Image (tube, rainbow, N blue to C red):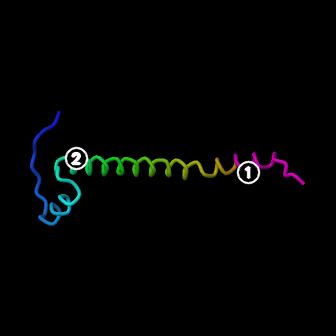
Amino acid sequence: MELKTSVAVSNGLLEQIDLVDSDRSTFLERAATAYLARQRRAEDDAHDAEILEREADYLNGEAAEFLEFQELPE
């Protein structure tokens, strides 16, 4: 469901939007959706980085153990 609302933006910003898309509402909706998706990805990436940092010693140990069993071709 769409709701009608109003927002205040500078004339310069509106001029830039109008150069890209004649439908301001659609442009702003797409821009907000893209921004929120980027924010969510950034949060997910930060969460993943925290997990990797927390488990780094364990994962490095597992990798080192695995490499010990690898035979290099002569």
Image location of residue 72, percent across then percent down = 84, 52
Image location of residue 35, percent across then percent down = 30, 51
Q: Which residue is disc 1 drawn over? A: 64
Q: Which amino acid does label 1 sit on?
A: Ala
Q: What residue type is labelled 2?
A: Glu
- The quadrant the C terminus occupies is bottom right
Using the numbered discs, state the Cα–Cα distance from disc 1 to disc 2 in whole angstroms.
49 Å
Q: Is residue 53 left or right of residue 33?
A: right
Front-most of 19 and 38? Answer: 19
Q: Which residue is disc 2 drawn over? A: 29
Image location of residue 38, percent across then percent down = 36, 51
- Identify the residue at the far bottom of this view: 12
Mark 1 vs mark 2: which is more N-terminal? 2
Front-most of 26 and 67? Answer: 26
- Let me know if residue 69 is in the magenta part: yes
Q: Which numbered marker is on residue 4?
A: none
Q: In this view, does 37 lie above or below 8?
A: above
Mark 2: secondary structure: helix
| Residue drawn at point x = 20 percent, y = 63 percent | 16
| Residue drawn at point x = 81 percent, y = 47 percent | 70
The crowding category of the residue bearing disc 1, from other C-alpha atoms within 10 Å (few below 14, some 14 to 19, many at least 20), is: few
Of the two numbered discs 1 and 2 in the rendering, the one whose residue sits closer to the viewer: 2
Segment tinted magenta in the rendering: 62-74
Mark 1: secondary structure: helix
Front-most of 1 and 49? Answer: 1
Q: In this view, does 51 lie to the left or right of 26?
A: right
Q: Is residue 43 left or right of residue 2?
A: right
- Let me know if residue 39 is in the magenta part: no
- Identify the residue at the far right of this view: 74
| Residue drawn at point x = 50 percent, y = 52 percent | 49
Image location of residue 17, percent across then percent down = 20, 58
